[in-house]
Amino acid sequence: MIGKKIEDGFNKQLNAELYAAYLYFAIGAWFEEQNLEGFAAWMKAQAFEEMSHAMRFYNHILERGGKIELMTIDKPEVTWKTPLEAFGAAYEHEQKVTKMINDLVDLAREERDNAALIGLLHWFVAEQIEEEEQTLKAVQKIEMLGSDKQALYILNQEFATRPLIATAAILNPAATPDE
């Protein structure tokens, strides 16, 4: 049985993961408007990955006899001045999520909830290292371009190659590893 504090924390994290998907969909839509379809594809792939993260919390809560509390998802920003600013917003968000996961680890330790700590949060700690790294690398690549439009075009093409995770992975994230 899941404890109330962990259940509440995981429901908040579920909401945060869904917000992250909204944010990445918003950034992706902005990139589409800028005719940067490769960057948009990267963000859409990230949005679907965030949805799979939300499902990990959703499933964990239910598997342990908890109650899902769906909350209002805040509206994200919808415009940015530059691709660098948009990816910078994504990187800042990943840093925020890392802090939230670390706070949940602390809570799970306090509550002596090893199922939460080892069964779920251990995976998320490692995942956030990857999330921050790949987003920071994207920021750094865009920074390197400066105002070179040809380089921006080439990087946009490179980012288009990021694969989307399958819908099945969103519904059952433990069955298929995230990209």
Image: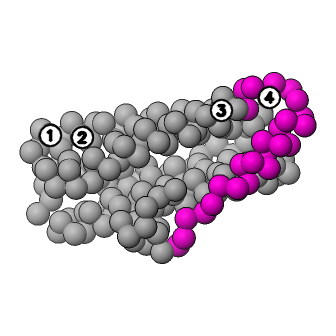
Which is nearer the N-term, disc 3 or disc 1? 1
Task: Look at the magenta stretch and give its main secondary structure.
Answer: helix
Residue 151 in the magenta stretch? The answer is yes
Q: Residue at x 47, y 58 (%)?
A: 178
Which is nearer the N-term, disc 2 or disc 4? 2
The residue indicated by pointer 4 is 145
Image position, residue 112 (x, y; %): 9, 45
Residue 94 in the magenta stretch? The answer is no
Regarding residue 65, the answer to whether it shows in the image is yes
Query: How many marks do you count on the picture?
Result: 4
Q: Are marks 2 and 1 in contact (CB under 8 Å)?
A: yes
Amino acid found under the numbered disc labelled 3: Val
Q: Residue at x 65, y 32 (%)?
A: 139
Q: How is the image coloured?
A: one colour
Spatial CA distance of label 2 from label 4 is: 38 Å
Which is nearer the N-term, disc 3 or disc 2? 2
**Is 139 placed left or right of 149 in the picture?**
left
The residue indicated by pointer 1 is 109
Spatial CA distance of label 1 from label 4 is: 44 Å
**Is 9 placed left or right of 142 in the picture?**
left
